[in-house]
Image (cartoon, rainbow, N blue to C red):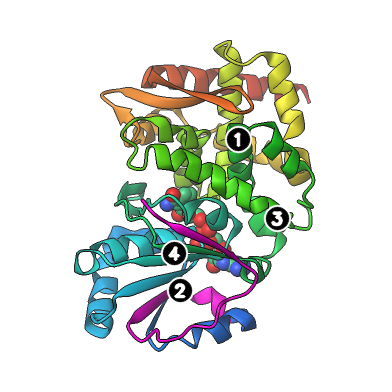
Amino acid sequence: MKTKIKILKKLPVMKNHHSELLIYDQYLMKIPLIKKWIETFPSRYAVKSGEKLKSIDQLPSHLEHLIKNFSFAQKIYILGGGSVGDFGGFVASIFKRGIPVVQIPTTWLSALDSAHGGKTAMNVGGFKNQIGTYHFSEEVWVIQAVLETQPAIRLFEASGEFMKTAIIGGESLLKKLQSWNWKAGKIRWSDLKSFIELKYKIVKQDPFEKKGFRYQLNLGHTLGHVWEAHFGIPHGLAIFHGLLFDIAWSVQLKLLSPQRAFDLMDEMPWSYVWDEEFKKKTDLKIYSLTEAKIRSYLIKDKKNKQGLISFTLVEKPGKVLIKKVPMEDILREYRRQQRTLQELYEEL
Ligand SMILES: NC(=O)c1ccc[n+]([C@@H]2O[C@H](COP(=O)([O-])OP(=O)(O)OC[C@H]3O[C@@H](n4cnc5c(N)ncnc54)[C@H](O)[C@@H]3O)[C@@H](O)[C@H]2O)c1
Ligand SMILES: [Zn+2]
């Protein structure tokens, strides 16, 4: 796994890129600066971002078009958010048995997380990320001028993923989060690098998720993925709720002290990000899911091996641990948290 990360101010001028194909989010044509750059590619393929793009049903028609028109391509540049990155990465990994990729993430979520680490993913029958490959990018270009074109909502949608990284990383990352202007959707650009580096530090030690070490990055993701898939909530927001679940369970299991959990909540910028009313509405919605439904998703969880799910819990900022837990324990904890929330909101 050798990926070169380039942190750049602007989109670079492309030269001799006739044998290279650009797969890009068609939405980006609305942004003049990016449109101009896209148009310098002689070979390009526009896609509509979102979960439908990752649906395996549509893959044959994309492949047919790509093979008919671009079979000469020797490298694929992927410009877009996480859905385009997952789709493009998967295509590149099977196109002529695999060709190199350069990822150019355009959302905070992809710049921080999904463009790094080599995982590609496709959805099957409404279940997320059931098919995929490991296809490590040759390069990832993280470009300030591109990422700063995003509206504030995109940072809000990535918030859970930033908080997850900070909890795994520890106090110094948590402090950075607090100094950003969340309401305006602005991060401190120079901070981004240390968040990305944390992901590589973990991925490098377990690139193919064989040792379980990489499971650390799944903090917030077990319940988060269920809510994301079922309600179509943006990934980073679903993960935010998944984090709250994991923190509460860590307290319940006496791994994390209530005081530490309280301090951690205080350190996370969630109060800047979330409006109380919106949080209440989301809580009531996601916890309305029946246990049977949750079970149907957990059975499909890739971390589920013979009924035991590798679950990531928190001991303190900077220290998470992986515990193999029976699915029934997760469901029991879900019921407990469901009751607690209902009581809390009834009191208010
Ligand atoms: N492979 C991995 O390791 C990994 C990790 C985390 C998430 N993911 C996947 O990533 C996806 C979510 O990522 P995402 O939120 O980036 O999704 P996305 O690609 O759907 O982008 C979200 C929205 O942002 C828009 N957008 C893209 N660039 C923009 C820009 N510069 N300015 C304004 N709007 C812009 C898109 O058009 C889209 O409407 C999910 O499918 C998730 O499963 C993958
Ligand atoms: Zn994630």
For the question of whether residue 118 can be seen, the reply is yes
| Disc on the earlier residue, 3 or 1 | 1
Packing grade of label 1 (10 A; few <14, some 14-19, many >=20) is many
Residue topped by disc 4: 84
CA gap, disc 2 and disc 4:
7 Å
The residue positioned farthest toward the top in the image shown: 254
Residue type (three-letter) at the residue carrying disc 4: Val
| Disc on the earlier residue, 2 or 3 | 2
Packing grade of label 3 (10 A; few <14, some 14-19, many >=20) is few
Range shown magenta: 1-29
| Disc on the earlier residue, 2 or 4 | 2
Packing grade of label 2 (10 A; few <14, some 14-19, many >=20) is many
Residue 157 % position (x, y): 62, 52
Residue topped by disc 1: 169
Residue topped by disc 3: 190
CA gap, disc 1 and disc 4:
27 Å
Q: Is mark 4 within 8 Å of ligand 1?
A: yes
Cβ atoms at labels 2 and 3 below 8 Å apart: no
Specify the quadrant of the image occupied by residue 322: top left
CA gap, disc 2 and disc 1:
32 Å
Query: SS for tag 1?
Result: helix
For the question of whether residue 284 can be seen, the reply is no
Residue topped by disc 2: 24
Residue type (three-letter) at the residue carrying disc 1: Gly
Cβ atoms at labels 2 and 4 below 8 Å apart: yes
Residue at figure coordinates x 78%, y 26% from the top left: 348
Residue at figure coordinates x 41%, y 77% from the top left: 22
Residue type (three-letter) at the residue carrying disc 3: Ser
